[in-house]
Amino acid sequence: METMDDVYTKKMQNTYEDEEERKHFQRIVSAFKYYKPHSLQRVKKTESYLLSLPTHHQKLLTKYREHLQDVKMCIENNDEIIKLIIKDVSHIFENVNPSSEQNESTLNPRPVLADQEKVQATIKQLVRDWSVEGTDERNACYQPIIDEIIQLFPDDICTPAEIQVLVPGAGLGRLAYEIAKRGYTCQGNEFSLFMLFASHFVLNKCRGVNSYKVHPWVHQYMNNLEAGHQTQAIFFPDVNPSDLPENAQFSMTAGDFLEVYTDDNHWDCVATCFFIDCANNVVQFIETIYKILKPGGVWINLGPLLYHFSDMPSEDSIEPSYEVVRQVILGFGFQIETEETRVKTRYAQNINSMLQCEYNSVYFVCRKPRRQTSSPDHRNGADGNGIQE
Ligand SMILES: C[S@@+](CC[C@H](N)C(=O)[O-])C[C@H]1O[C@@H](n2cnc3c(N)ncnc32)[C@H](O)[C@@H]1O
């Protein structure tokens, strides 16, 4: 068995070779370190405005002022978890020490607002992946994928440990963990250091059930029905991450999916959840998935098309509709076996908020043919069938 301490053994050894990568690493560490001052600054702004209001208004808002004290406490509590998350992160990666003494002293990047949002998103992701409160979300997003894998690779006709499953864009690793827990050899891949630091903490450091708490919604100042909804504490992890079967084969890799996975015909299954819209060019993701799957291998996907780089001035992006994405999938030679649209899914939702966001996700299972008949480039991509509802 690969022990949980070894979950990060298959890592990108060269990722932090160059100075740019080191600076990036340091910037993310700094973003976590700036969490507390940045978040407190936001509350203090409200507090000082409150103090400038007419006295009779302030009197009517006494409870609200007390609530802001609670908000500050929650930020302090979150910061305690953040300190644990970034403790020893420089040792996550093999053979490299991205935050050497020299870098600590020479690099002290100023906080970037987008990075602060990512720190907050990382805290919310703990709810989605590793809390009881995230159960419904996981049942909607991860369970169909897990069920499909069990159905496609049942243990009465195959040895699960011999089935290689890849989860690109693994986030905090719960889907990959659940697949490994069922006996399959599963590797999660992730390139965001925000996610990698937090998943490393959960998977390798957290022991015991619900032994840590965060206040994931404390930065949501709007749409609160009750003050307590903003300061709600969520405990994690809801399961003991080291509770994997003796023979479980579970690993996480760090790095860009497109760069890490270059071996053709390797994987029995690629499982993507809320991932394919993270591409500048979704066609490249589909092409890579096709190449790395073994002939006869399956790609299971669930998620929307919230193209992440759309409308980002410094990024290139294409945003084909699902109708077009589907043609691209067929164009590479995949055979679609299962397809469903309007699958109700949520992503790191605060269920108490007055604002709710729900995706009509698409779910599909497609197979790389056992025998390829013609070069994918020569296929026209259309099979004459429309999208299945
Ligand atoms: C929307 S999140 C979904 C995370 C997880 N699958 C879930 O459902 O909660 C997409 C994840 O993919 C990661 N990601 C995006 N592009 C990637 C790439 N090229 N290589 C590896 N990871 C990537 C992002 O950092 C992010 O954590």
Image: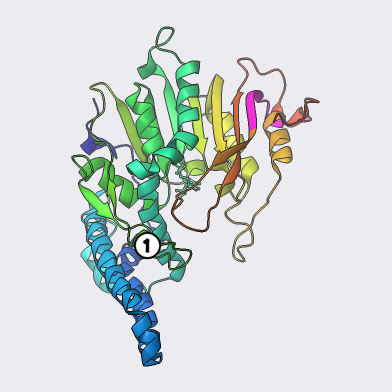
Decide which of 287, 120 is in the foreground and name it. Answer: 120
**Can you tell me whether the CB of the residue at mark 1 lies under 8 Å from the nearest atom of ligand 1?**
no
Q: Residue at x 32, y 67 (%)?
A: 35
Q: Quadrant of the C terminus?
A: top right
Tell me: 302 left or right of 81: right
Which residue is denoted by mark 1 in the rendering? 230
95 in relation to 60, above or below:
above
Q: Does the magenta segment cover residue 178?
A: no
Report the side of 117 relative to 290 (left or right). Answer: left
Residue 332 visible here: yes
Q: As drawn, is 352 to the left or to the right of 386?
A: left
Q: Quadrant of residue 205?
A: top left
Point out the residue furthest to the right here.
384
The magenta region covers 331-340
Q: Nearer the viewer, residue 190 or 13?
A: 190
Q: Amino acid at mark 1?
A: Gln
Vertical relation: 203 (above or below) 143: below
Q: Nearer the viewer, residue 77 or 102?
A: 77
| Figure check: 39 above or below 385 | below
Prevailing secondary structure class for the magenta stretch in the rendered image: strand
Identify the residue at image location x=42%, y=52%. Answer: 192
Residue 120, position in %: x, y? 39, 60
- The residue that appears at 37% across and 79% down in the rendered structure is 61
Query: Residue 41, located in which quarter of the rendered image?
Result: bottom left
Helix or strand or loop: what does disc 1 sit on?
Answer: helix
Looking at the picture, how far across and down is residue 186, in whole percent? 38, 29
Residue positioned 37% across, 42% down in the render: 129
Q: Residue 383 lies in what quarter of the image?
A: top right
Q: Quadrant of the N terminus?
A: top left
Q: Position of residue 267 (x, y in %)?
A: 48, 25
Counting every numbered tag in the picture gives 1
